[in-house]
Amino acid sequence: MLTDSHIDRVVQLALDEDAPWGDITSETFIPAETQATAVLNAREPGILAGAEVFAAAFRLTDAATSVDLHMADGDHFTSGATLATVSGPARALLRAERIGLNFCQRLSGVATATRAFVDAVHGTGVHIADTRKTTPGLRAFERHAMQCGGGRNHRFSLSDAVMAKDNHLAVLTARGMSITEAINTARSRLGHTTSIEVEVDRLDQIEPVIAGGVDIIMLDNFTLDDLRAGVELVARRAVVEASGNVTLATVRAIAETGVDVISSGALTHSVRSLDLGLDMALHGA
């Protein structure tokens, strides 16, 4: 998902946004021949994500820079750990610093929060998944960070799988079509490799949806009691996904209802970036 070409494209856009006509501060204060070494340090524990993205910020700014990654994506680090060392022209390091940090801090925050959720449901067999509630333009980055934290990815885009939500069903039922008929009609238009997921928000919707032969059924904003009842009604005839109001405090109880997957938009739209710092030392004139 996170290819070198995609990393370069997104990081270059960020660099262009941050210094569209150059870094006038560094170009004014720092002599061109000055070299520097910078160390990426962790100021709190976490899970690393975005190491290659961090490195790309410096590489794309100046090919004369060198980035030595001391840890890989998915690695756990403690407070005070050295994650990477960067060396090269001081002006380049100063120009790329904020972009490299912004990406690495953000993605490591996603990975760290995901790992906490994954650890919370350990032993239940339940998978933690993301949603499409990602930062526009950064979906591949944030989805990669989810994987670094031990999570799984939902459909990447609207083109990947059929997922009928409440608004889709409302349109169809307003035209006089039952939920089962709507699902059967949709399936007749799809290739055999395309899965169908349907979101429901009431127990009485489950049987008509299952009758349509769905692959996945999402129980949205169900209480714990209704989740247990929903799992029993589905009776392994489809994968059961729970979503809505999932927090670290509630995720274990949700997992213990018997669902197969728990998806959480908060893991990409509401996480806190980790506190990482780049400590720099200048050399030469």
Image (cartoon, rainbow, N blue to C red):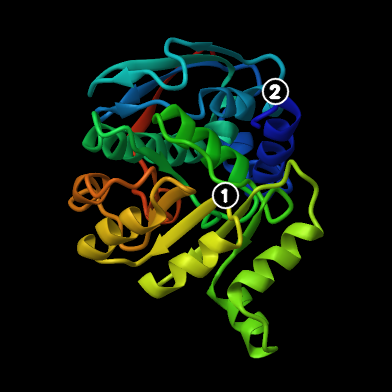
Q: Is disc 2 in contact with disc 1, using a CB cutoff of under 8 Å?
A: no
Q: Who's the residue at 27% across and 45% down the image?
A: 255
Tag 1 secondary structure = loop
Residue 124 in the figure: left or right of residue 206? left
- The C terminus lies in which quarter of the figure? top right
Kindly identify the amino acid type of the residue bearing the numbered disc 1. Answer: Asp
Q: Residues within 10 Å of mark 2 (few under 14, many from 20)?
A: some
Q: Would you place residue 18 above or below residue 169 in this image?
A: above
Q: Who's the residue at 45% across and 72% down the image?
A: 205
Instruction: Find residue 125 and report its image quarter.
Output: top left
User: Picture coordinates of residue 88 (x, y %)?
Assistant: 59, 14
Q: Would you place residue 55 above or below residue 112 in this image?
A: above
Give me the C-alpha separation between circle 2 and circle 1: 49 Å
Residue 229 in the figure: left or right of residue 195? left
Q: Of circles 2 and 1, which is in front? A: 1
Front residue of 242/103: it is: 242
Kindly identify the amino acid type of the residue bearing the numbered disc 2. Answer: Asp
Numbered tag placed on residue 62 in the rendering = 2
